[in-house]
Amino acid sequence: MSLRRQDIGGATDMTKGNAGKLILKFSLPLVFGNLFQQLYSITDAAVLGRYVGVDALASVGCVSWVCWLINAFLRDWANAFSISASVCMGKGEEEEFRLIAANAVTICMVVGIPAAAALLWMMPWILGLLSVQPNVIHMTRQYLMVYSLTIPIGMAHSIGAGLLRAYGNSRVTFVSMTVSNMVNIVLDLIFVLVFGWGVLGAAAATWIAQFMAMAVALASAVRVPAFHIKKEELRLDSRFMGELLRLWSPMIFNSMVIAAGGLFVEKHTNQMGSWFTAGLAACGKIFGLLEAVIMAIQTGVSVYVGQNLGAEQFKRIRDGLAESVKLGLGVTIAMVLAVLALRHGIIPLFLSPEDPTAYQQAFRTADMDTCIVLASMVIMTPMYLYRVTIQTLGFPKYAAAAGVLQLAARIAAVTAGAALLGEYAYFLTETMAWLVSLPVVAIPCVRYLKRRMEEGEPKKT
């Protein structure tokens, strides 16, 4: 039996029609969904930094790369399932799609809880490794403990939403993140400002909001016939798991290597003092909001490439990639110019003026970091889009190689760069990482698509 996407409202067949318009239409709900998702951490940072103090913001910022790795762990699982499922959509294989959905449920149960337990067990070692300062370590421990407990529910939400996107429904991300972020904002204000729970309250609000996101995504999935799974189907299929791990392993390796570089930088920035960490954290929240838009386009490109790969339409993949790069760069430049013009009004939203000295130091750090990182997004955007394309085409080794180069670039920026430029070297770590990885993913992607086009499209029977 073949999958019929038109049977579901909001589903998108990306194997026909204008590539640029399809990717844009598909990505728009994801843009808003990703923006709402970023508002989780932005709300936490704004409430803590503005109303609790610079140290509270630093306590969250000093483990930002740990949180990034947790989110990458969830995202990589979701992407691996989504790529496999979107290829099935291109081929029209309903039974194969249902097999993927059944394996997703099982993976969530057998991976999510042990992963959270492992992180909790490793927490003392992590805090020591990152040189978390004594004045913030208690708050950091509280935040990271509760954040770790979001892994099982976050995994269910990420994979569920990823499968729905592969099926052609990108609206679920927007709806789930809208609902959960409204919950997060309200609970942040209640837990932190009314109850006075500080960092622990912000973390608890995030956990409850993540649960709401999971509930909305699963409620959407159960209304789709292809997700109606029988109890006996809830087992790991060895054939599919081999394919899934082939996709997931290089992704998580890439994420871990990138995170290793980030953690190396974070260890050194934590030693600079809580004001420096707070400044970087403020910039990180601003950057995260802009990055969320590009990651939505990236997700749209992944589904587009996956469906057309299943249909073996390589010229269409090339044309769609070219359109998405133009779109991404245009959006990036517009966002960066707007935020740079308004940054002096945005940065104070994350910083408490209670301690004037700490405020001035953190503001100066955030201002410099924001200018450099945001300007460098013109390198980041095409790198993200080429990277997801080469991964979806079945060559994740290039993304993994790019990750290794990012690790080397970050270490070099902090060690050799700091000796030459002082604290300014820390502002260049992301720029260097994106710059060295762009050609590693872009060149093989262009060459592969050119070769497949020269071979010609397969004849349809």
Image: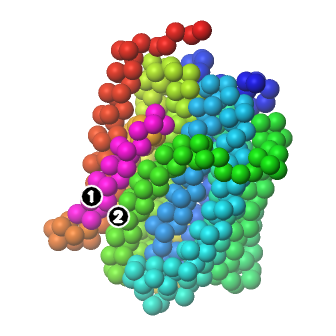
| Apparent side of residue 42 relative to residue 377 in the rendered image (left or right) | right
Which range of residues does the magenta coloring cover?
A: 392-412
Q: Whole-percent x and y of residue 45?
A: 56, 69
Q: Residue furthest toward the front? A: 238
Residue 368 visible, this angle: no
What's the amino acid at mark 1? Ala
Instruction: Judge whether residue 202 is colored magenta.
Output: no
Residue at 60% x, 47% y is 238
Residue type at the position of mark 2:
Gly
Under tag 1, what secondary structure? helix
| Residue located beneath label 1 in the image | 409
The residue labelled by disc 2 is: 261
Question: Relative to 227, is 117 on the left or the right?
Answer: left
Q: Taking 336 as reference, is 317 above or below it? A: above
Q: Is residue 398 magenta?
A: yes
201 relative position to 395: left or right: right
Q: Position of residue 191 (x, y in %)?
A: 72, 77
